[in-house]
Amino acid sequence: MSVLVYTESENGKFKKNAFEVASYGYLLAQELNTELTAICINAENPKELENFGVGKVLNVKEAKLPSFNAMAYANVISQALEQENSSQIVLSSSTDTKYMAGILSGKLDAGYCPNVVAAPININPLTLKRAVFSNKGFANTEIKTPIAIIGVSSNAFGVIENKVDAEVLDFVPNIEDSDLGVASVAIDKITGKATIADADIVVSGGRGLKGPENWGMIEELANVLGAATACSKPVSDLGWRPHSEHVGQTGKPVASNLYIAIGISGAIQHLAGVNSSKVKLVINTDPEAPFFKAADYGVVGDAFEVVPELIEKLKEFKAQNA
Ligand code: FAD
């Protein structure tokens, strides 16, 4: 019996949230006085997980799963759970994992708690603190089913190193044709750019930027910081930026370490999706803009003056500290 963590990877590389869920799983395993086992699918370096307390890695190398597939992944994880006789599964709260966890929950009759933001409040009964109401509040949630699925929020618990010596074992799941009824046949991905879901820093622009021709400075600021770019809903509705950059209640959620909002008023629907970012910096000409109430740092000023200056200062700082 052990705690099982599902560690996400993309193109063979572990995502940052893989190390975060491993860190969470390690703490849970310590509390339960048991071992920590991870399952990974087509990861290049499964042994990397030993840095975060994983003692055993079930390594799936499966050509039938070249990319994420919710049904098939749920099936693979449930087989690992059965083999390990685990009662707790820890995974991330990414879009893919949330989609898959619902299927897994149905398959295992397991209670599922997503958006968990802290270590368990209590182990028996398992009580978890999770973000609710678009990150405007918290709920303490008990899971009473024999199997519990715990979805950890990005950047909430953190990555904690706990070096152990992991044994890596090949795990060969039984994949049914019915699992592959829906599959991605081609993925066209923008390369070389941080994605909103994984980025530590997100630079986001709103209608205050006046038009798509002014996005050069947003891109440049993002480049200097190694950040992803995002935008408010009207900006993507107007076709200034692609819909893939739209963040908020009806767009992508952001849970970065730093969110920089430039020329965005801070409407409730925007805040709903970005509120769980750790630090929020707002640049806006209007001191009454609602975003300032939610911000950690605010600059009242014209983006067309502040952003170029910020870029210059950051470049100087990087050059001095290279
Ligand atoms: P505005 O509200 O027009 O704000 C522009 C800001 O730029 C202002 O605060 C202004 O002071 C500032 N500004 C102007 N010039 C400058 C300058 N030179 N320098 C610096 N600042 C400047 N919105 C989302 O973003 N995401 C969502 O997911 C979303 N979902 C929605 C769902 C529903 C059902 C509804 C009804 C609305 C939703 N909206 C969403 C829209 C939301 O209500 C707001 O209309 C939207 O967020 C406003 O976008 P904005 O801040 O870019 O534009």
Image: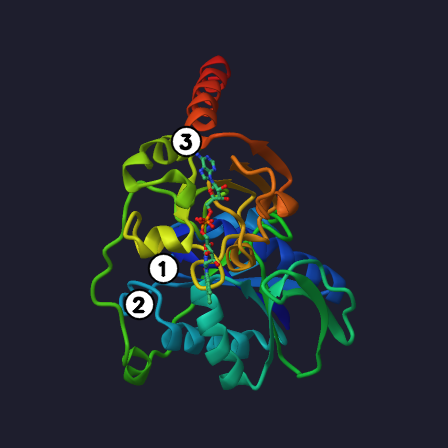
Task: Find residue 188 and report its horizontal and vertical position in percent.
Answer: 23, 55
* 86 to 46, vertically: above or below: below
State if disc 3 and disc 1 touch (CB < 8 Å): no
Q: Earlier in the sequence, mark 2 or mark 3?
A: 2
Q: Which residue is mark 1?
A: 42
Residue 321 placement (x, y as % from top left): 51, 16
- Near-viewer residue (279 or 64): 279
Q: Earlier in the sequence, mark 1 or mark 2?
A: 1
Would residue 255 be visible to someone looking at this image? yes
Kind of residue indicated by mark 2:
Leu
Give the spatial CA distance, label 2 vs label 3.
37 Å
Q: How many numbered tags mark residues here?
A: 3
Q: Provide the secondary structure element on which disc 3 rests.
A: helix
Q: CA distance from mark 1 to mark 2?
A: 8 Å
- Where's residue 105, x and y in %? 53, 80
Per the image, the residue denoted by label 2 is 65
Q: What residue is at 42 percent from the left and 50 percent from the top?
A: 196
Residue type indicated by callout 1 = Asn
Q: Which residue is mark 3?
A: 221
* As drawn, 31 above or below 240: below
Earlier residue among tags 1 and 3: 1
Front of the two marks 1 and 3 = 3
Real-space Cα separation, disc 1 to disc 3, in angstroms: 34 Å
Q: SS at mark 2?
A: loop
Please state which amino acid type lies under the numbered disc 3: Leu
In the image, residue 5 sits, relative to residue 146, either above or below, namely above
Quarter of the image that includes the N terminus: bottom right
Q: Quadrant of residue 134?
A: bottom right
User: Is label 2 or label 3 in front?
Assistant: 3
